[in-house]
Image (tube, rainbow, N blue to C red):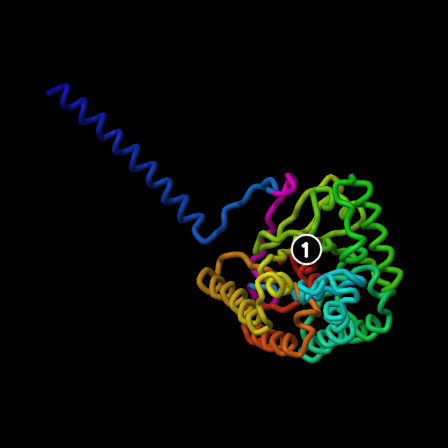
Amino acid sequence: MKNETSVNRKNKRKRDSVIQICLAFMGFFLLTAGTPLPVKNSIDWMTGLSREPIHIAEWPGGKKIAVCFVLYVEEWGLGHGPNFRPDMINRKPDFVNESFRQYAINSGIIRVGKLFKEQGVPLSIALNALFPQKHADVWKTFRSLVPQAPIIAHGINNSTDMLPLNRGLKEQEEYIHRTLDLIEQETGVRSHGWSSPSVYANADTFAATTAEGITYSLDGMDSDILSRIITKSGPLLLIPYPTVTVDMGQYFERLQQASDLEQLWINYVTELVREAESHPTDEATVVVIGIHPFVVGTPDGAAALRRVLQNFKKQKLVWVTDVQEVILNQHN
């Protein structure tokens, strides 16, 4: 009987201990419910650099999704892509593909500028440094349509003078410095943003950009939220630039027409809206939509893009903005 009583007491103590542990976990859950747990810095999977998420509860006006349209104003040069008809690239001269690119310069860029001005929607510009001097009249007209659009440095050109990858940090710093100088010389703007030509960068690129005064980059393509990468030259903000939202890859590689891109962009952003409505305590998201005058600068491309802009302006949780405003409002 004595042994049986002793066993019962031991079992009771065990039960009491289990109950206390369970209550402690329940208390912890109640205290933290609805509050995101802190995320420790992690190592960026591509560069090996330290990377930290930037948590934003909402954007100005209670918006939950920031959308930035970035128009790529690029210098390719004769004989260089993109090619609308790859089967014709061996022709000399290749009037079909050269005309495709030239139409984008002569008409597409200005058409996009007019569309954003008409819709009263902010636009950001990713600019090859050689474009303003090679196409001075086009640049002057386009810039007059979107005079406040922030300029993101996009290398020297998109074909023959790209980032000197795998040639050391110093050469990349010199290339970036030359890019920034040329853009400032032609536009009067010293860019603080960077987008590598063809999104072709490496770990040295991140350190080289910060060393040259760049504070944000579009070279991060793997997230829905802002993050900060820590280079040996300083911190660099990554604004998400998802691969699937870029019109050029969808158009050339996946053969998506303008109307297909219209539906893709609306679906992409509307799903982010649905998630925000279903989980209102989740943090705010941001997405860059990369557009090119070869795609959205045609009449059918502009018509599709207009419908996208009109759709986004009606969505109460969507903030159509530019990259500079995202940077300024990252502490909300």
Q: Give the answer, above or below, for where 232 lies relative to 57.
A: above
Q: Is mark 1 on a helix, strand or loop?
A: loop
Taking the spot 56% from the left edge, 41% from the top edge, the residue there is 40
Q: Tell me residue 233's x, y (percent).
A: 76, 42
Magenta extent = 46-64
Q: Give the answer, above or below, for where 252 lies relative to 146.
A: above
Q: Neighbour class for label 1 at 10 Å: few (<14), some, many (≥20)?
A: many
Q: Quadrant of residue 251?
A: bottom right
Residue reaching furthest to the top? 3
Instruction: Please name the residue that numbered disc 1 is placed on.
Output: 218
Taking the spot 66% from the left edge, 72% from the top edge, the residue there is 296
Residue 275 lies within the magenta run: no
Q: Tell me residue 323's x, y (percent).
A: 69, 62
Q: Tell me residue 282's x, y (percent).
A: 50, 57
Residue reaching furthest to the front? 91
Quadrant occupied by the C terminus:
bottom right
Residue reaching furthest to the right? 185
Q: Quadrant of residue 43?
A: top right
Of residues 191 and 308, which is closer to you in this image? 308
Quadrant occupied by the N terminus:
top left
Residue 53 lies within the magenta run: yes
Q: Tell me residue 271's x, y (percent).
A: 49, 65
Of residues 140 and 330, which is closer to you in this image? 140
Q: Quadrant of residue 254?
A: bottom right
Taking the spot 66% from the left edge, 61% from the top edge, the residue there is 326
Q: What residue type is labelled 1?
A: Leu
Taking the spot 78% from the left edge, 74% from the top edge, the residue there is 106
> Would residue 202 be found to the left or right of residue 19 on screen?
right
